[in-house]
Amino acid sequence: MALWLANGSALCASKRGEESLLHENKISCQRKLSSLHPLSARASSFPGCAIGLMNDCNISRSHLMKGTRAVISNLGTQAAAFTEKGKVQGLRGTLKKVVLAYSGGLDTSVIVPWLRENYGCEVVCFTADVGQGIKELEGLEEKAKASGACQLVVKDLKEEFVKDYIYPCLRAGAVYERKYLLGTSMARPVIAKAMVDVAREVGADAVAHGCTGKGNDQVRFELTFFALNPELNVVAPWREWDIQGREDAIEYAKKHNVPVPVTKKSIYSRDRNLWHLSHEGDILEDPANEPKKDMYMLSVDPEDAPDQPEYVVIGIVDGLPVSVNGKELSPASLLTELNVIGGRHGVGRIDLVENRFVGMKSRGVYETPGGTILFAAVRELESLTLDRETIQVKDSLALKYAELVYAGRWFDPLRESMDAFMEKITNTTTGSVTLKLYKGTVTATSRTSPFSLYRQDISSFESGQIYDQADAAGFIRLYGLPMRVRAMLEKGI
C-alpha cells in the first residue's frame, strides 16, 4: 500500500506490512504498519495534504498519479475515491468545483469543509456587497481560506442592486401583503445571478447556498440558478446534512480544524442590505410580544426623533428617483443618503406577520427608512400623472408583481413583461415631490409635474368655463340607472 502526500512524498506499506518513504520517486522501507487508521489520522494533520492509497509502492510518482486511489483530505479521516479524471469521489457524490454564497459566519464556514468532504470538490467562496456594511466584509478572505476554500470572490453589486432590482420594484409599486417592501426578496436574485457569472468564470459545475429548508431564500436562489444556467448542479447543505443547530455546527468545525468565527451571536436573525434591515427570531417569534427598543439599528425610536420636522425634495424622472434636495445622485448614493435622513426621524419601521412562500407564517420587523420615503414620493407623483383607470390596473398588477418577486421569480417572463408595462405607463411620471418627515411619519406637502393631469381651471369651485355643473344631472341619472331599476322592481313600481 502507498500513501501519497501532496507535498511530493509518499508513505508506503508493502504487502509484507512494511512502511516505506517514497521521496522523489525513490522508496526506502522503514517500519511496519499496525493499521491504516492511525496513519490516516496522523497524516490528516498536515495542512493541505492529500493522501492516496495504492496496492503496490514499488512504482514511480508519475505512475501513481495515473491510477485510481483513495484520498483522505485534511478535513477529516473519511476516505474517498480519486478517479482517473482527477475528480474526488466524496461521501455523497462527485463535483469539480462549487461556488458557495459565503458570508463568513458559522454556517457558511462549516459548509466549505462539508462540501469538500461530501463532494470531493474545490470550493470558491463568493460574497456580494449589496450594502450590508463594511464590517461584514472584513477578514473574509482569511476566513474563507482557513475553512478550506481555494478562492474568495467579492463583487460590489450595490449600484446594480438599486438600479436593476430595487428601482423596478419601486416603479411598479410592489408591496407584499400590504406592508413588506421586499428588501431580502430583491437582493437574492442579484446575488444568485452574480454566482452564476462567477461559476462560468472559474469553471465551476455547481453552486451552493446556506439557506435553510424552511425559508423563502432557498427558492429565490435556486429559481435564479435554474433560469440562468439550468446545467449547474445545486447543493443545499441544510437539506442534506445532519447538523441541527449552532452547537452541532461548532462541533463539526472543531472536528475539521475550521476556525469558528468569534463574533458575538446575535439573539436575532438579521439580513441587511442597502434597502432594509430585517429582524427575526427570539421574542419576535411570538406575535404578541412588542419589539424591544434596543433591537433597531437603522432608525431612532420615533419618540426620540427631533421635535422639528424635516423637509426633503425628491426629483423623479420616468417613475424613478434621480435627486434629493436638487442634488443628482447615483441610485446607490441616493438611497444611502435617504437612509440617513429617514433613519434620524424614525421613518420606515414595520412589524409584519407574513405568509412565507413555503406555507408557514412568520413574524418579522423591518427597517426601510430610505425606501419608505421613495415609495411615498413616487406614489404621490403618480396621483398627478396617472388617470383613474391606469392607477387601478397598475395597482392590481403591482400585487402580482410583488408576489412574483417574493417567490423568487425575478427572471420569470411574466415579471419581465409586467415590468415593460410599468416602464411604459410611468414614462410621464416626472416631477418633484416634497415630503415632511416627523417622528416616524412621511407626509407629502407639495407635488409638481410638467405632465400633471390636474387642471385648476377645471377643479376650482370658482370656475365654470370648462366644466358645467348642470351636466352632472344627466350623468348621474344614466350612471345610477341600474340601481334605480332594481329598486323599482323591489317596490313593484
Image (cartoon, rainbow, N blue to C red):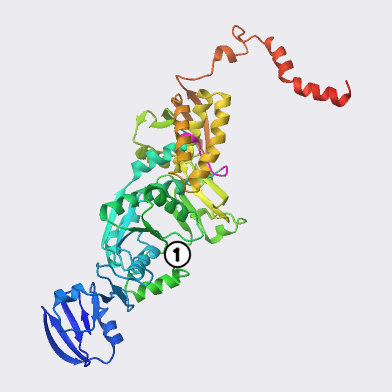
Which residue is at the front of the view, 452 or 61? 61
Q: Is residue 262 visible?
A: no
Q: Which range is magenta? A: 171-178
Residue drawn at 51 percent across, 37 percent down: 438
Looking at the figure, which quarter contains the N terminus? bottom left
Image: 16 above or below 458:
below
Looking at the figure, which quarter contains the C terminus? top right
> Which secondary structure class fits the magenta region best?
loop
Residue drawn at 20 percent across, 78 percent down: 4
Residue placed farthest to the top in the image? Answer: 465
Q: Is residue 257 visible?
A: yes
Density class for disc 1 (Cα within 10 Å; few <14, some 14-19, many ≥20) is some
Q: Position of residue 176 (x, y in %)?
A: 54, 44
Residue drawn at 33 percent across, 74 percent down: 256
Query: Which residue has dot 1 on it?
Result: 238
Which residue is at the front of the view, 293 or 150? 150
Amino acid of disc 1: Trp
Q: Is residue 2 left or right of residue 41?
A: left
Query: For residue 478, what is the image quadrant?
Result: top right
Q: Is residue 168 a member of the stretch shown in magenta?
A: no
Image: 42 above or below 75:
below
Q: Position of residue 436 (x, y in %)?
A: 50, 32
Q: Position of residue 451 (x, y in %)?
A: 46, 20
Which residue is at the front of the view, 360 or 51? 51
Image: 257 above or below 366:
below
Residue placed farthest to the right in the image? Answer: 492
Query: For residue 247, what is the image quadrant?
Result: bottom left
Element type at marker 1?
A: helix
Q: Is residue 411 left or right of residue 9?
A: right
Q: Position of residue 137 (x, y in %)?
A: 32, 55
Which residue is at the front of the view, 205 or 350? 205
Residue drawn at 58 percent across, 25 percent down: 388
